[in-house]
Image (tube, grey):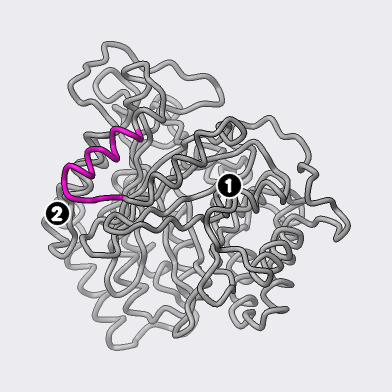
Amino acid sequence: MIPLIESRCNETLKIFEKKYLSEELEESEQPWQTLGQLVRLLKNSNAEFWWHASGPILGTLMKEADYDLQSQFTCLIFHLYNILPRLGPTNMAPTKHQWKSFMCDDFSPLEYSWNWNSQKSGPKIRYSVELSSARAGSSFDPYNREPTIELCTQLRRDMPKADWALFDLMQHAFYDSSIVKDSEPKESGNSSSSSLFLAFELGKHIATKAYFMPTRADQHGISRMDVLNQAIQMLRKRGYPCSGYEKLLRFITTKQRSMLEIVIVAIDCFESEESRFKIYMRSPRTSFASVCETMTLGSTVDVLTEDARTNLKDLWQLTLGLDPCFSEDADLPVKTHQTAGVLYNFDIKLRGSSVQPKLYIPVKHYAANDASAAIGLGKYLQSRGQDAYFPNYMRALERTCTHRDLNMDSGYQTYIGTGVQKDDSLALCSYINGEVYHPNRLCN
């Protein structure tokens, strides 16, 4: 815990915790509402802004996913102590620098996810974050790494079950700390110098994941592909064969598929035989035919059986609102945004030979609006008998997207992530951008 917050709030927190465990809360009061009282005691405008922007969303998602009260309380306290103070100055203070995060298209530093794929329990809630400080983007911290590294140092002590060996290795592989930058990074209005994110899967035990942008490519004037190849070599020297990487490499280095752009890589902060190296890549090709080609690595990975392909096509058409007659070879409407196109994730097993492709349907760019994307997802879930939690999901959207109507615009839901499972069904995950900087949010 952060000493300043702990000293001010420890006694109050004990009262809140006692209140929860003894079930003395009023029926209508939610954990995030109770903790909001604690935040106000801090008398810190930045903390209040970030709690108002994130606490209700996290709390509502967990409630609708049927997290018990103690889990909600634990996860929100983690967020309050560890994340909130490290989200940096807000744009509510015009004299302070505002960091442009690559996390979301509107530079919001937080993205939430609702993982549908749980047969034994309700959905799993996760969120990704880029921490920040007043030094972000300056010559002291040009790529905004200090707050995240500082938190990781703390988490090494607080989460003894986590394993940071892969984190340390990848941090060096994707960023050269020996290069001292004398000036602030040059950014255009649509770009960001973000380099490092963290993600947390919420539950009784909080699991951590780290994301690395290929910053070393910019530092050394080399390609992102070179940086990725060097990272794989470093993993192999440490005893991780990553045998599936060659299969992916053969696919992405052919002339036709060379348009795939490396965006970011991710690792789980734990050591096990199932540990994976996740490579996120974006393609400008947006036809369903190109999706199938990429998901099978040019027909070299046998994941799209007839049933799986049907499932994937139905999900694609329903969430994007496409006519059933829309040609599989036709691209979606042209978009010029930096993140336009189709996003993929290739999971490479560190100690195995498998490659598992995953698709992220970019509803933020190509769905008519958020209501349309959500309704399309609901139709898919209902057709597969998987819609038990869909009413909860819709309530969560409506109760957290309070600054605008879901049918007025797109972007509150960013992606529908999916991968093919062993029984040909689709694993599903919905991603949400809280739109921190939306004008209507700032007016409230």
Residue 241 belongs to the span the image colors magenta: yes
Helix, strand or loop for the magenta stretch, by majority: helix
Q: In the rendered image of this protein, does residue 337 appear above or below residue 286?
A: above
- Write the residue at 17% across / 67% down: 11
| Mark 1 → mark 2, Cα distance in angstroms | 35 Å
Q: Is residue 212 visible?
A: yes
As drawn, the label of residue 209 is none
The percent position of residue 223, horizontal first and vertical second, equals: 41, 23
Between 26 and 295, the residue placed more toward the observer is: 295
Between 329 and 85, the residue placed more toward the observer is: 329
Mark 1–mark 2 CB contact (< 8 Å): no
Q: Is residue 225 shown left or right of residue 257?
A: left
Q: Which residue reaches farthest top?
A: 182
Q: In the rendered image of this protein, does residue 425 appear above or below residue 121?
A: above
Q: Amino acid at mark 2?
A: Arg
Name the residue that disc number 1 marks: 441
Q: Which residues are magenta?
A: 228-242
Between 4 and 68, the residue placed more toward the observer is: 68
Neighbour tally class for label 1: few under 14, some 14-19, many 20 plus, Cα within 10 Å: some
As drawn, the label of residue 156 is 2
Residue 1 belongs to the span the image colors magenta: no
Q: Is residue 321 shown left or right of residue 353?
A: right
- Write the residue at 68% across / 44% down: 365
Q: Is residue 45 visible?
A: no
Neighbour tally class for label 2: few under 14, some 14-19, many 20 plus, Cα within 10 Å: few
Q: Amino acid at mark 1?
A: Arg
Q: In the rendered image of this protein, does residue 256 appear above or below residue 271?
A: above
Disc with the residue nearer the chain's start (1 vs 2): 2
- Write the residue at 71% across / 49% down: 289
Element on which disc 1 rests: helix
